[in-house]
Amino acid sequence: MKNDFEVIVIGSGPSGSVAAILLAKAGIDTLIIEREKLPRHKTCGGGLVNRARNYLPVNIQKVIHREYFEVSIFDHQNNSEFIVRDSLPIITMILREEFDNYLVRSAVENGAGIFDDCKVLDIEEEEKNVRVETEHGNYNAGFVIGADGVYGISSKVLGNRQNIKCLPAVEAEIETADSNYRTEIARFDLGFFDHGYGWTFPKRDHLSVGVIAYKSNQENLNKLFDEYAKKLSLNILKIHKHGFVIPFITKYGNISTKRILLTGDAAGFVDPLTGEGIGNAILSGKFAAQSIIEGELNVDSIQLSYRNKIKDDILIELKYSAFLAKLFYNHPAVRKFLLKKYGQQFSEIMTDVFAGNRKYSTLLKSPSNYLKLIKPLTGLTA
Ligand SMILES: Cc1cc2nc3c(=O)[nH]c(=O)nc-3n(C[C@H](O)[C@H](O)[C@H](O)COP(=O)(O)OP(=O)(O)OC[C@H]3O[C@@H](n4cnc5c(N)ncnc54)[C@H](O)[C@@H]3O)c2cc1C
């Protein structure tokens, strides 16, 4: 068994697997090391927005549960519902266990290696390579992609964890006896508590129901979840409930060194307004792979290229999304007012963001664009 690789990817979530697919396709000797035995469970709503789906380098038709061309946003503060429609799926439903396993298998089919059930214990950057210490021996790589989530080893070693805020979220897979539950619609519920939202995503044979809170602890969140499940009036037959955190970057810190690049949740790239993290996990995995491929082993140009791509396409979006999240979740009265007056426009704008047709930055960056954004909200004409 060999010990030296050109690239080692730590973690086989969407970020790590997509990076490995692209590296292996480019003929780069790549190994994925995954802590869990595969396929593994991942606590997640499994809602893939169309922007995220478009970033994928493989066709995922085989693992799709449902595609939603219509999404409903319930505003409980004003007792209103906004329905949005699009010609392309707004949200695609997947099960993370199946989706992640499909991506890691694609990486292997393209030539990457995989060690699962093998926890990485430490990584140490040396002059000419990175030493990766695992439960089952030590390995060396020219580069490491740290795609091992917020509690993985990579974020800790690079000192990035202190720049990440973790918000608690609860997700449950629910089997229900209700034959009349509206499975033709995926829904978000705003305003039934002040600082967060709930979602109900129908899968092939169950519902994924969850709650995220921007100001709460796990205990309160369980109460909020129960309240939400009650509101949905589901006749529950079976329920599997899991809690985990959603990580947001609060300060641009150490997302890379010369030979280690952090991606996805390890870097804290989740959208603060929506809690959607698969899209940026895939995009950052893609950027890490592209930077290594294009950089032709030049450590300085690889690091510079990765940082620039992340800054231009991810960090700026997260900055503006964080601004909106603060406005929305810290000021319930403002949210109530805005949704009462402009709920439908807001829902349509968010559908465009999910589709990748609009960016938070182009909406909010310059005064003229900001006016364009608020024009439909204020009824102003140019
Ligand atoms: C309750 C909840 C609901 C969510 N719902 C959605 C949603 O509907 N849509 C959406 O877009 N996003 C959602 N998210 C966010 C999304 O799940 C994450 O942003 C996404 O999984 C990040 O992907 P990743 O590849 O960076 O990390 P992960 O998917 O977390 O993968 C990291 C991998 O690294 C492995 N690992 C960790 N440590 C080590 C180690 N030391 N050695 C080796 N391997 C290691 C882990 O086992 C794991 O397989 C949700 C999150 C939560 C908590």
Image (tube, rainbow, N blue to C red):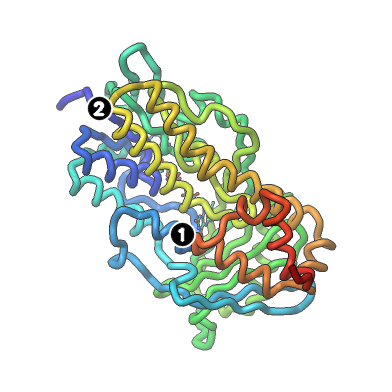
Q: Mark 1 belongs to which amino acid?
A: Arg
Q: Position of residue 341 (x, y in %)?
A: 79, 73
**Residue 85 disc label:** none
Check the image and name the residue furthest to the left.
1
Q: 193 or 179, which is in the foreground?
A: 193
Q: Position of residue 371 (x, y in %)?
A: 73, 60
- The residue under label 2 is 6
Q: Mark 2 belongs to which amino acid?
A: Glu
Nearer-N-terminus badge (2/1): 2
- Secondary structure under tag 2 reads strand
Instruction: Give the quarter of the image for residue 145.
Output: top left
Check the image and name the residue furthest to the top.
127
Quadrant the N terminus occupies: top left
- The residue under label 1 is 51
- Secondary structure under tag 1 reads helix
Quadrant the C terminus occupies: bottom right
Distance Cα–Cα, label 2 vs label 1: 30 Å
Q: Position of residue 44 (x, y in %)?
A: 49, 56
Locate residue 105 relative to residue 122 in the image: left or right: left
Locate residue 186 relative to residue 144 in the image: left or right: right
At x 66%, y 77%, the residue is 82
Locate residue 61 relative to residue 86 in the image: left or right: left
Q: Nearer the viewer, mark 2 or mark 1?
A: 1
Crowd around label 1: few <14 · some 14–19 · many ≥20 (10 Å): many
Locate residue 139 relative to residue 192 in the image: left or right: left
